[in-house]
Image (spheres, grey):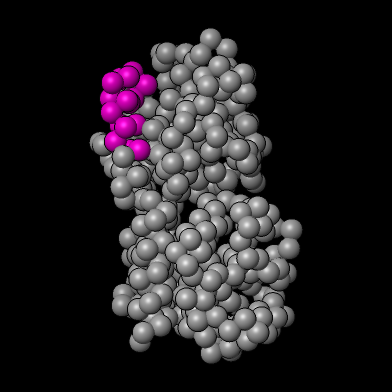
Amino acid sequence: MKVLHVETGRHFYGGPQQVVWLVEALVARGHECTLVCPPGSAIDTAARQRRLRVSNLFCAGDLDLPFAYRLTQFINELKPDLVHCHSRRGADILGGLAASFADVPAVVSRRVDNTEMALMAALRYRPFRRIIAISEAIARVLQASGVDAERITVIRSAVDADAFATPPDRGAFAREFGLVDDPFTIGAAGQFIARKGYEHLIEAVAAIAETARPFRVLLFGEGEQDELLRRRAAELGVDDLVRFEGFREDLDRWLSGLDLFVHPALAEGLGVVTLKAQAAGVPVVGFRAGGLPEAVADGESGILVEPGDAAALAEAIRTLMDDDGRRARYGAAGRARMQESFSVATMADKHVELYKSILSD
């Protein structure tokens, strides 16, 4: 098959990384893939480093109609069997429009679980043969927005578990993050925006600060709430316990050095970073929101509590902090689950099956 992938995001967050893994796996299976992405974007760099076939088209966002025109021309020249749009700022709406103009069947990946007006959903998804939801939670949101269930296919995001097989040197980990006396280390990662819930994590840290064993929290990320979260940590007197580490492109390298990973998102499509943590053998604590119950097996690879309940989050953190044996069991179970059910190979095979079913209609 000849497949054109369209990803217009500029940063290499979870979604674009999934695109690169998928394209790599499809190429390894003998399919011809081309990735369209903006020049100078992080995914452009990552894809070229992996020697994937890349073409650059600038996209200013959902209203960049000239992008739809340029993409239509490119599709007409390339003549792919199918176009796969990956939902980011213009790739879904304009990508679907371009595929429709070029009369090429198209699919789109949906990675977020935010609600959408029925009219907007009808316009957004009309050009696509199938909408790929990365979790059952997203599939339910799509159906609630009026999308027919028959048009929705659930293919969960994946993680390259083999990349996390070797834990980092504990001494190197401590030096990298300035950890003295080897404290219990908790990690959290994502954009500093309201729906990621980091304020609740800081409140949970404050609740256990006086009575827990020595610990530190490493927050990886950046975003509009950066200053707000720093102020909140200072107000609660835990700014010495919570470290703001910024966005780290090499985060995957260090995940297995953590003792516990916390994901306090109030809304989440699936939570790819929790898949990575589990692949690294690190148990996860988080809120039972969106697709998180599909990503984390509650009571098996982590503990999930009601969204927004900082006290319950604190209790879950404390429970695993105090039980080394349980934490080890959860870590091992999480890694095994990622290898068995969330592998890149499984994700790629399901995409191939979907593509073939569309092209055979």
Q: Residue at x 65, y 52 (%)?
A: 49
Q: Residue at x 58, y 76 (%)?
A: 95
Q: Is residue 137 above or below residue 30?
A: above
- Residue 183 location in percent, x, y? 49, 15
**Which sits in the foreground, 2 or 173?**
2
Q: Indicate left or right for 319 with 78 as reference.
A: left
Q: Which residue of the protein is positioned furthest toward the left in this rendering? A: 299
Q: Residue at x 30, y 47 (%)?
A: 340
Residue 346, located in which quarter of the rendered image?
Answer: bottom left
Report the number of numbered marks: 0
- Residue 166 location in percent, x, y? 46, 31
**Which sits in the foreground, 227 or 138?**
138
Q: Is residue 177 above or below residue 41?
A: above
Residue 107 in view in this figure: yes
Q: Indicate left or right for 62 with 195 as reference.
A: right
Give yes or no for residue 333 being in the magenta stretch: yes
- Residue 202 location in percent, x, y? 50, 30
Residue 199 in view in this figure: no
**Which sits in the foreground, 299 or 104?**
104
Give yes or no for residue 36 being in the magenta stretch: no
Q: What secondary structure prevails in the magenta region? A: helix
Q: Residue at x 56, y 22 (%)?
A: 173
Quadrant into which the C terminus falls: bottom left
Residue 178, located in which quarter of the rendered image?
Answer: top right
**Which sits in the foreground, 152 or 212?**
152
- Residue 357 location in percent, x, y? 35, 78
Q: Which residue of the protein is positioned furthest toward the top in this rendering? A: 181
Residue 20, located in which quarter of the rendered image?
Answer: bottom right
Q: Is residue 176 above or below residue 7?
A: above
Over which residues does the magenta segment extend?
320-335
